[in-house]
Image (tube, rainbow, N blue to C red):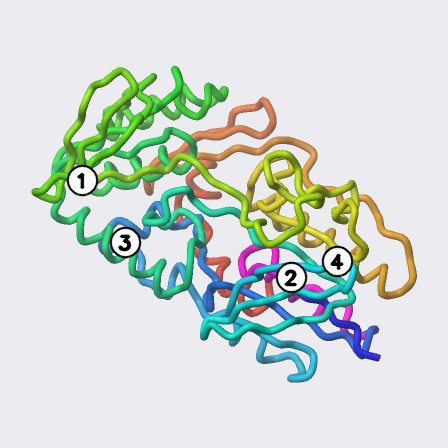
Amino acid sequence: MTKTIVVLGGAYAGVGVAHRLLKHTKPSVKDLKVILVSKNSHFFWNLASVRAIVPGTLKEEQYALPIEKGFAKYPADSFEFVVGSAEGVDVSAKTVKVVTQNGDEKVLNYDHLVVATGTRTINTNVPWKSNGTHEEIAGHIAEIQEKVTKASHIVVAGAGATGVEAAAELAYEYGAKKEIVLLSGDAEILGGDSIASNVSSELKKLGVKVRKSARVADTNELPDGKTEVVLQDGEKITTDLYLPTMGVVPNTEFLPANLLTDKKFVDIDEFYKVKGAENVWAAGDAVWKPKGSFVLADKQAAGVAKNIDLALKGKPPVVVKTIPMDVFFVATGRGRGAGRLGSVKVFSFMVYMIKGKTLGIQQLPGYVDGSAF
């Protein structure tokens, strides 16, 4: 009898779970079938979004590749790809209601369900997360590239890692040709992390104008196409291009409320099994444990795939282990960066080699075709 695993989410965690099950579990569980549901037909390497907005730096195929082609090597009866979004889950009946890209509704039955739907940015017009379809994301990037080309003044709001990296990429490319302003709502960038001073120095070298304690209260589109940015203290800044980077929310609205934390992330145990539901698992930014992270998502996906493998073989789950320390790397353009391993700061060149040089895009083909797993 077929054992069906439904995986919701076509990014780092979801694709990672699907490939691992098909590569490593399918050979011993012959009747395994994986159904992968993704709102995006392509795997979007959003780590590179901060560079993709700079015209001429990346081609579309370098940051996005079709998901389905990567699974073509598996037997046709063992994999199904659905472009659509989950609209509801019935954990008692073990069903998921999905609305496809064509607007059709279908109900998927599962033996195990994996929630890897990630998070989205509050502002849907920026490409930092996989908000929407491939066409929508590529369209946002192309639109921003066009505006970047024409702009002489750009405001990046939010001085977390995404905001810092976006401002740095723009400044690295244009130098003094364009004025790049980074607004930090807090008294220090990166929430006052121990590498904040190092990153501030790198931004200063690039010519980025950092404004601290400058929280955005509102924005207004002006008749000439510019944006008026209103700060909490009442100051108004007029800019050619406004790029907000603050604020993400989990894509979990389709789940029963009792499966979520007070912040609407998926509530899981140490096995990454969802509390209060049978055979439901979760990984990636949708769990935010302890935070959203590419490295954590990959480790969590490996752990979930392993535990589903064990469950299918009648064995108990094992505690999912991720990484023993907090790793934080911030790229500052295509030449330098700052970071730490736990509390130990690392050399700028190391951050450049590990992250800043490519932002990981060389790993995209391996994620899509499964060779990375």
Q: Which mark is residue 221?
A: 1
Instruction: State the residue position of label 2.
Output: 373
Q: Is residue 217 above or below residue 252?
A: above
Instruction: State the residue position of label 3.
Output: 57
Crowd band around label 1 with a 10 angstrom C-alpha radius: few (<14), some (14–19), many (20+): few
Q: Return the residue found at the far bottom.
A: 76
Q: Give the position of the C terminus as an image quadrant.
A: bottom right
Along the horizontal axis of the image, is 195 left or right of 177? right
Q: CA distance from mark 1 to mark 3?
A: 28 Å
In this orientation, which residue lies closer to the viewer: 96 or 371? 96
Q: Give yes or no for residue 17 being in the magenta stretch.
A: yes
Main secondary-structure element of the magenta-colored stretch: helix
Q: Is residue 191 above or below residue 134?
A: above
Of the image marks 1 and 4, the number of the one nearer the N terminus = 4
Q: Determine whether the residue tagged by mark 4 lies in a helix, strand or loop.
A: loop
Task: Please name the amino acid that badge 1 sits on.
Answer: Glu
Q: Determine whether the residue tagged by mark 3 lies in a helix, strand or loop.
A: loop
Q: CA distance from mark 2 to mark 1?
A: 46 Å
Of the image marks 1 and 3, the number of the one nearer the N terminus = 3
